[in-house]
Structure formats: structure tokens, C-alpha cells
Amino acid sequence: MPDQTPLQACQPTLESLPVTADAIRQDIKQYQFYHLGRILKDCPPVYTYRALAWTLRDRLMSDWMNTYARRDLPGKRRAYYMSLEFLIGRALSNHVLNLDLDKTARASLQDFGHSMEELVEEEPDAGLGNGGLGRLAACFMDSCASLDLPVMGYGIHYEYGMFRQRIENGYQKEDADHWLRDGNPWEVERTEFIQRVQFGGRTEHFTDKEGVRHARWVDTSDVLAIPFDMPISGYRNHAVNTLRLWKSTATDAFNLDEFNAGSYTEAVQEKNHAEHISMVLYPNDSSENGKELRLRQQYFLASASLKDALRQWHAAGNSDLSKFADDNVFQMNDTHPTIAVAELMRLLMDDYRLDWDKAWAITTQCMAYTNHTLLPEALERWSVALFERLLPRLLEIIYEINARFLRTVSMKWPGDLDRQRRMSIIEEGGVQQVRMAWLAIVGSFSVNGVAALHSQLLRDGLFRDFVDLWPDKFNNKTNGVTPRRWVAHANPGMSALITREIGDGWVADLSQLEKLKPLAELSNKAFHADWHAAKRANKERLAALVKADCGVEFNPDALFDVQVKRIHEYKRQLLNVLHVIHLYSRIKKGHMQGWADRCVLIGGKAAPGYAMAKRIIKLVNSVAEVVNNDPDVNGRLKVAFLPNYRVSSMEIIAPATDLSEQISTAGKEASGTGNMKFMMNGALTIGTYDGANIEILDAVGEDNFFLFGLRAGEVDALRGHYQPHTYLEQDHELRDVIDLIGSGHFNPVEPGIFDMILGAILSPHDPWMTLADFRSYVDAQNLVSLAWHDKANWTRMSILNTASSGFFSTDRTMAEYNRDIWKLRPA
Ligand code: 26W
């Protein structure tokens, strides 16, 4: 409820509804009967879920309004988190936790014949994101609310979220995720704040009465952006922030000519076209595909959000635009929304008639950019021709930004044409392209990476020229995850245990987990036993899920070895599979010295167009099929591929994991955040010196972490003379693994299907250098198995991992963004 106008009509502080079990029960009944038209008896659980969701949303409403009433004052500074992705997952239990209503809500459900657990399962995941970047945005929103920071999220109200993954004959199949089919009980549609977004058309330049030159964008095809607000509750602090998601729709003005000519359906088609913009999330998380609709989405988000932020700022009683940057900051989640730089310039100049210098000063004082990847194929570039057609006025502005910027460059480095070419926002060459990362850097006052190594590599590599020019713009903000969802909610058993020992202050201040350190000592037998029992119960819960979804039996006493994340060559699920095959071949040969029984779980989605990633999934499933059914294995090794990995599955997986696989090629994983979820839940990590693994290693100490593999510098140094065959020659265990795949042992009825995988890892051009790390990985895995045998010491290391994970709370991350970039005052 972020606007003053409706609030002024009501009293300054709105009363909240009663939160007794009776009152809640009464409201659920009310919604179920009077609103949904379902009688109590035999009501399908989905309706009871919806009635409960509305009942709880009602309990958030007064805090939601009051949060904005407190903040909606002139001169109050705010941040806006702009992201094409918010991977929220489910909201019900999150709000229940934040409102401290778990016991009450359970008690209120007696009459309905459904348990809380059943109702929770009725909520579809809000899968409005691909992976790490989208989930990070959701964790950030949670922490901002819990810190009572005035931050609003801006995103897209996708009708279809991340596709659902099915496995058929070992292959990934995609189904549409129509998560909004039955409506979304949490959201509030706010048609009073609709914005109009322009596309196409042409620009006109003219001189006003005072003789000043201006531009206007005319003959455009417009679409409307309707905001849907999702409440983001803070942890027990009565703060409720807003995630505002824009849905596209046609303007009401139908094409009347066509209408009158009897072409009703053609006129309606326009509506269809407009609605496409927010129809579906693009399922690529590492390579841009240059699709026009994607650029439309990006501009749609940027334009609607900036107009809305300007509207809010005016509504709060402000008018002097020279103060706009004092009151507003926009954090851009990767380059996806960075057309916002040019759009804010356009709004300030064309709509508010500011001159270039004033508009540029404002823009560059309120834009901030976060980079999430170093992979060159993920760097967004848009063809100038496409820009010209879709956003002609924005292209003009980008050209002007670039011309002025290149003048700065040439003043600093006169005659250095090569540098100018490298730094130009417009890439010349066959097809001219707009480099969105360069636009973001030039237009922002802050540029950050997401882990210490990542930020360093950006400084030394990709962004080097810009660091030479503006060293103070660049900073690091190591990622985190929210401990509310990822520990308090996902791991109630361990949470109760921690609270019993150190009180519940850790939920809002994760650094307090440090207090567990003394309890890790081996002498604390009782605590150790309870810790182990909590983990064991979580493993049973995961084993049930694996049984149900994969048909594979996991023994909760075995080591649970887990890798879940998007499937990508740089993340090296292949290295994991090579190790699994190696374990299998050890069993076949009877080499059982130091053996530990393992259950290996792999899960993740492959981008639908990424053939190699899809083949890797097939390999995992084929290996699983053979290993799980070979009588020689006899249950000592189990392998499963968990279909449709998503936020709600991670809530079961992380608490049950013993060993977290973080095995990317060094220098390629910007940060990783799954690594943090596992650590918080007491898993040990086997990992490369990459991304936030390095900071995890620092925090927990090298004795409690299984480090292996080349460092980023070594990977770089090896490029150009990488010789995978030398590893084969030196390592007969590696040879056995490769031979086993090559022999067709895992694909007797589909000959040749894994040739492309062997071709990739045996190539001297393999950018991920999988074979270079095989030996050191297997050695580290052998140490894992040895460590697993010493149960007491494993539990000690597990406790130490949780106890050392405080730094990885997004509360800390957000506090750093706020201290260094946003500079907001908690309300
Ligand atoms: C344009 C296609 C596209 C879409 C998404 C390219 C790149 C992306 C993202 C940047 C991919 C992503 O999710 N990156 C991940 O961001 C996480 C949060 O910072 C990091 O923890 C991961 O290491 C990083 O891969």
C-alpha cells in the first residue's frame, strides 16, 4: 500500500485483526463458505488453503498499510530492487513463521479435516526465476522487510513461471507452469496505478517557445502495465514490504478502424500481442538469446517501474527533481533491467523537460548495478537494429550517452583508440550491438560483484578499463540466503535444538550461531546425539521424497551426497558423475578399502535449448539405472536424479544433506548460494576454490571443508595448452571410468548417445577442464569417506559448519548494501 492518497483517508494507525485460533478458524470458514462456496465437509484442500491464505493476508493488511504510512513522508529515502526474476517459492509457511502463528494456525484447522502440512502442499511455487539470481532477489526481499528497510521490489507478473521438468526415459521434458491458473491469493491488483509503456513509433525533435530543443516519441504502440502487489512480511517486526509485479495488457483503445470495418477479431488480436509481454519467463540462465520479446520484457519492467517510482515520489509530496536522487536508489539485478538508465534519462528530459546535464546527474546518482556472472555468453548485447525498431528514442539517448562517455575516455587516454573501441557502449563489427553491461556501468554510481573472488575477477578482467577510469565505483557484496526460510522454516528439528541451547535470537541475528561452537566439542555427547537425530529425521523425510519422485530407495544411514542447481557444464555435474562411475567400478572390482555407503542425489533443470546439459541429465539417469539395479552393488551406492528441482524441494533437500557438492571450474561460479543453504543446515562442503566457497572455507576452516582442484589463476594459465589425454595416461582409474562410458555400458539400447559428452571432456578445448580436476576430486572424496566413518567427528564438523554460517545471512548482505550503496534509514 505504498501511496499516500488512500492512506490519508484512513486513520494513521490501522487496527489489526485478532489472531486467536477461534478468530482465524471463523475467517477460514467465512472465506470457504461465503467466498468460495464450499461447505466444510469434504472440501478439497486447495480451497481450504486459499481460505487460510486470505485469512492470513488479512492479518498482514494493517501492518502492510502502516509500514507505508510510516515511510510515506517527503524526503524519506527508498530503494527499488529491479529484477526480471523473483524466485519466491511458497508464501504460506513463510508468513506463518514471520507472524509467529504456527501453533495458532494449526489449532485453527481442527474442524477442516486437513493438516497444515497438507495445505502447504497445495500452494504452487511462485517460480518466477531461473536459479541463483532469482532466488537471491527473493532472499533480499525477505531480509529487507526483516530489517525494516524501505525497499520495494519491481518485477514481472509472469503468467507462466519456470517450466516444470519431467523425466521420460531418462530425458528432460518440459511442461508449462501455469502457476496462476487458480489465482494467487496473496496478491492485490492495483489498477489505480496502471502505467502506459510505449513501443515502436519514431522520434520528433522540436524547439519550444523559449527556443530550447526537445524530443518526443510519437506514433507508438502502447501497452498498459497493471501492478500486482505481493506482501513481503518481516520477521516478527510488523514491517510488510511490497513486491510489485507488472502484468501487460492492451490499452482500452481498440483499433477502431478495424473494429468498424467488421474486423473485431483482428482488433482483439492487438490485445493478445500486448499480453504476450508478461506471458512467460525466459528459461535461460546463462546464455542470452537475443529474442525481441525478451527486450520488450526488459523495457516494460524498466519503464513501468520508473514511472511508478516517480509517481510515488510525487505522491509523497515531493516536487523538486534535483532532489530525486537524494530520495531514490534503483538496484539493477544484472543487466536485465539496465535499459532503465536510458529510460530515466528519457523521462527526465522528454516528460519533465530537464536538460541533459541535470538529467544525467540525477540518473547516475540513483542507479546501481550488480553483476552476477563472468561467462561471456551470458553478457547481454542487443542489436542496434532491433533497438531502432522497438525503442528508437532510447537508442538516440544511448548514442548520446556513449558519445559523451567516449569523450571522457579520450580525454583521459588521448589517442588510445583501442581503449575507446573496447569501452564503447556500442560494439562495432558485423552487426552493431548495444553492450548492456557497459551501459549499466556508465550509468551507475555503484557496480558490485557477488563474492570476493568474483568482484576481484571483474576488476582484473571484464571491467578493468572501467576500474582504471572510476576505481571507486566498484565494490563487492558477498551474497547470502535468508535464515528464516532456509533454516527456521526448512529445518524445524535443528532449529528447535539450536533455540534450546542459545535462545531464538539467531533467527534475526545469524551471527549468534557462533555460540554453538563450544557445543561442537566431542565431549557434548547429548547435544551431538540430538544433532545427529535431527539430521537423521531430515534424511528420512528426503528419502521419502526420493522414493516417491524417483522410485529409488535411499538408506538414511548412508552418506547423502547432493548436487542440486541448474545443469550447466561449468557447474560440472559431469565431474560428479565421473566420480559416481568410479565408485561403481570400485564395487565391481571389489576395491572396498575405506568405503562409505553413499546416496548420490542430483537435480536441476537444463535450459530447453541447451543440448549438452540435457544429455548430462540423460547420463545421470542412465548411470542411476545401472547402478541401482546391479546386484553386485547391493545397496552400497544409490544414485537418483530428482525431477523438477525447485525452491520447495530445496527446503527438504538442504536439511537432509551430509555432503554439499560445489564443484564448478574455478573462476566460473560468481558466488553460489546453494552452498550457503547447505552449510547453514550442517552439511560439509566438497568444493573448488571458487565463488563464495572461498568465504565458506575461510569461515569454517580448512579442516572442516573438502577443498580440491585448480585455482582460477591455474585454470587460466592452463588454457591454450590443456591436454586431457595426459590425465588419462597417468590415471588408470580415470581411464576405467572413460572406458566404461565409451563401452556403452550405460546405454546398451541407445548406442552413441554419450559420444558428445566424451567428445567434450576429452577435447583440449574443454573450457571447464573437467579431467584436470578428476584426480584431486577423487582424492578429496576418499577423504570424505574416511571422515564419514568417524561419526562423532563428522557431527562435530557438521555443527561447526552451522555455527560458522552467520556471515551468509542476507541480513548481513542487505546491511552492507544499505551501508555502502543505498544509505536508507530503517523506519
Ligand atoms: C540473459 C540470460 C541470462 C539470464 C540469467 C544470463 C545470466 C543470468 C544470471 C546472471 C544467471 C545467474 O543466476 N547467476 C547466478 O547468480 C547467483 C546470485 O548472485 C550466483 O550465486 C551464481 O553464482 C550465479 O551463477
Image (spheres, rainbow, N blue to C red):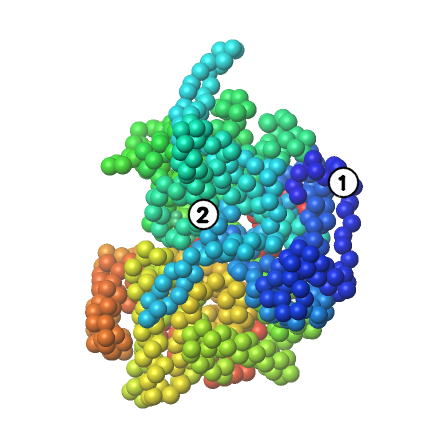
Give the structural element (helix, strand or loop) at label 2. Answer: loop
Picture disc at residue 396 = none
Say few, some or many: other residues with alpha carbon within 10 Å of mark 2 (under 14 / 14 to 19 / 20 or more).
some
Give the structural element (helix, strand or loop) at label 1. Answer: loop
Type of amino acid under label 2:
Met
Q: Nearer the viewer, residue 288 or 416?
A: 288
Asked if disc 2 is less than 8 Å from ligand 1, the answer is no
Asked if disc 1 is less than 8 Å from ligand 1, the answer is no
Sequence order check: which comes first, mark 1 or mark 2? Answer: 1
Q: Quadrant of the C terminus?
A: top right
Please say if 254 is above or below 497. Answer: above
Q: Which residue is mark 1?
A: 10
Q: Which residue is mark 2?
A: 279
Location of residue 286 in the rendering, given as x and y in whole percent from the top left corner: 38, 53
From the viewer's perspective, is 827 left or right of 138?
Answer: right
Type of amino acid under label 1:
Cys
Residue 257 falls in which quadrant of the image? top left
Location of residue 207 in the rendering, given as x and y in whole percent from the top left corner: 46, 13
Query: Measuring 46% from the left and 77% from the top, which residue is drawn there?
Result: 547
Query: Measuring 37% from the left and 68% from the top, which residue is drawn there?
Result: 167
The residues tagged by marks 1 and 2 sit, at their Cα atoms, a distance apart of 36 Å
